[in-house]
Image (cartoon, grey):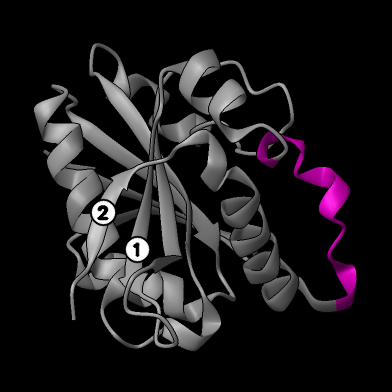
Amino acid sequence: MSLTIRGIEREDQEEVHDLVLEGLAERWGAEFDPSYNQDLVDIIGYYVEGHRATVVVLEYPDQESESRSVIVGCGILLPLPAEDVYGTWSPEPASRIDDLKGLKLCRMMRLSVAKEHRGKGFAKHIIQHLIHTAKEQGFDRIMVETETLWTSAVQIYKAMGFVIVESGEEHVHFEYTL
């Protein structure tokens, strides 16, 4: 098994767009409205060029053709503060603002692995890569927010050393100190 994690390229955008939306549709079910995810229309323009974010994709050999790979996962490391034009992430919990002053922060987000490739450790590879990247870029902390009901996401962040700093009925906020 040869995994490759690399930066997103323009020709990857549609595949990453579909990968993330499929995961969200699975999580949200009938409530899911893809129109709320306009940041995914131009991932490079919005995240890379607009916010200097690191966007990575995880490639895995295509089972049908050994000469090509398919994108089976992705993730974003977004420097903070950033202007959230589309409302794709929520601000830090108000109770934490004073604790975070003076720190170089980033947010890990849009972590997604294709359904048929889950359970193979791919999300861990992406998270490890983004943690390493955050260290290289001089960040002090990584922030993550996920839905309380998304137990697999909550479990993987805990397993990777992220600490819950706030938890409610709908959201769980994590931090990872670098």
Quarter in which the C terminus is drawn: top left
| Tag of residue 145 | none
Inspect this view and state whether residue 82 appears. Answer: no
Q: Residue 61 vs residue 167: left or right?
A: left
Number of numbered discs on residues: 2
Quarter in which the N terminus is drawn: bottom left
Q: Identify the residue shown where x is 60% and y is 16%.
A: 83
Q: Amino acid at mark 1?
A: Glu
Q: Amino acid at mark 2?
A: Ile
> Which of the 4 image quarters holds residue 126?
bottom left
Q: Which residue is denoted by mark 2 in the rendering?
A: 5
Q: Identify the residue shown where x is 60% and y is 24%.
A: 46
Return the x and y of residue 96 as percentages of the image width and height.
39, 32
Magenta stretch in the rendered image: 30-40
Q: Is residue 41 above or below residue 170?
A: above
Q: Residue 139 vs residue 89: left or right?
A: left
Who is closer to the viewer here, 163 or 16? Answer: 16
Return the x and y of residue 107 as percentages of the image width and height.
40, 36
Callout 2 environment at 10 Å: few (<14), some (14 to 19), or many (20+)? some
Furthest-top residue in this view: 102
- SS category of the residue bearing label 2: strand
Q: Identify the residue shown where x is 35% and y is 77%.
A: 155
- Chief secondary structure of the magenta portion: helix
Return the x and y of residue 166 as percentages of the image width and height.
43, 52
- SS category of the residue bearing label 1: strand
Callout 1 environment at 10 Å: few (<14), some (14 to 19), or many (20+)? some
| Tag of residue 59 | 1
